[in-house]
Amino acid sequence: MIRRSLARRSLLGLAAAGIALGATLGALPARAEGLLRISQQFGTLYTPFHVMKDQGLIEKHGKALGIDIKVEWTRLSGGAAINDALLAGTIDIASAGIGPFLILWDKTRGTANEVKIVGAFGAQPNFLLTNNPNVKTIADFTEKDRVATPAAGVSVQARILQMAAEQAFGPGNARKLDNLMVTLPHPDATAALIAGGTEITAHLSNPPFQNQALKDPKVHKVLSSYDVLGGPATPTVAYATVKFRAENPKTYKAFVDAFNEATKWVEANKKEAAAIYVKVEQSRLDPAFIAEVLSDPEVQYTTVPLGTLKFADFLNRIGAIKAKPTSWKEFTFEDLHAASGS
């Protein structure tokens, strides 16, 4: 079965990367400035990271601050694996869905490894897609359907489906469709959805994979995250420990400055940004198609988190986190506080 084989591949990939899945909350050891290890996942929402890598922006801003920074990029899929890597000290900047971030923020509050958001990857919609012609709403799913998400039950896509279930079926039913979720990275889930003939009949996706899948006549959209959340919201964020920021102020600032520069550059240069995405990803997709994805009017390019309190309220309501923050500033670094976030 596709679920079993791909799950095995994912586990083997994590083992090969040396990720300590059993990381604890013990204080991470201090180290000298000048090394920055960053994780990223899949999708055009990471285009600012592609630009930072291609143009050497972190290194540039490091030199402006008087230090040489060696940057290491790691590809991981799924918030749980990324959180484990951050706690294990194998990465310094994590990037994952707002859901996995909030879980770790709640878990680490008041500890030596407390985490906060460094910046957001703008606001982009996530589409729930299906190749099952009988599924028009989430109420139409049956036990024969399987919905792919990057991390079943806990990824931001999984949380969006849970929020949609609560809205459709009523309070107390947020997890009604959890038994249908399957863990698959976006590229594999997209391939399975388009190919058909597997247990995967739906995918809660992200750009450009959802745009690619919708070009197939067998695939249609069931809902958008913007429908569920009532408007634009940040699905994915970059975050780090308070300890890393305090002990590596120049390295941290170089990353923030590079992230801000890259995000603004993507907003102003979508065609060029699309070419960089294709080059860095070694993608076979047409740069013109990627430029179309980046130019979607529903997409916003900003490092300021949007709509994150809606996720926090939901996770608190279903018991996934204990804390109930009253402001988005409680789980973000001060660098962001002058902006109008939510």
Image (spheres, rainbow, N blue to C red):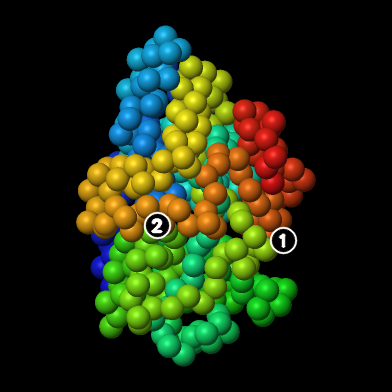
State whether residue 88 appears in this view: no
Describe residue 243's horizontal placement relative to residue 15 as left or right: right
Q: Look at the numbered disc 1 and give the secondary structure of its residue.
A: helix
Q: In the image, which is nearer the foreground, mark 1 or mark 2?
A: 2
48 w.r.t. 141: above or below: above
Describe residue 254's horizontal placement relative to residue 233 as left or right: left
Q: Look at the numbered disc 2 and give the secondary structure of its residue.
A: helix
Nearer to me, 152 or 212: 212
Residue at horizontal 54 percent and vertical 58 percent from the top = 298
206 w.r.t. 75: above or below: below
Q: Quadrant of residue 206?
A: bottom left
List x then y, in percent, for residue 186: 37, 61
Residue at horizontal 27 percent and vertical 77 percent from the top = 195
Nearer to me, 264 or 17: 264
**Mark positioned earlier in the residue sequence (1 or 2):** 2
Residue at horizontal 74 percent and vertical 43 percent from the top = 327
List x then y, in percent, for residue 225: 57, 64
List x then y, in percent, for residue 251: 45, 21
State whether residue 167 appears in this view: yes
* Residue 317's disc number: 1
Q: Quadrant of residue 334?
A: top right
* Residue 292's disc number: 2
Describe residue 171's horizontal placement relative to residue 234 as left or right: right
**Which quarter of the rendered picture does the N terminus lie within?**
bottom left
Mark 2 belongs to which amino acid? Answer: Glu
Residue at horizontal 63 percent and vertical 33 percent from the top = 336
Answer few, some or many: residues within 10 Å of disc 2's Cα (few below 14, many 20 plus, some between 14 and 19).
some
Mark 1 belongs to which amino acid? Answer: Arg
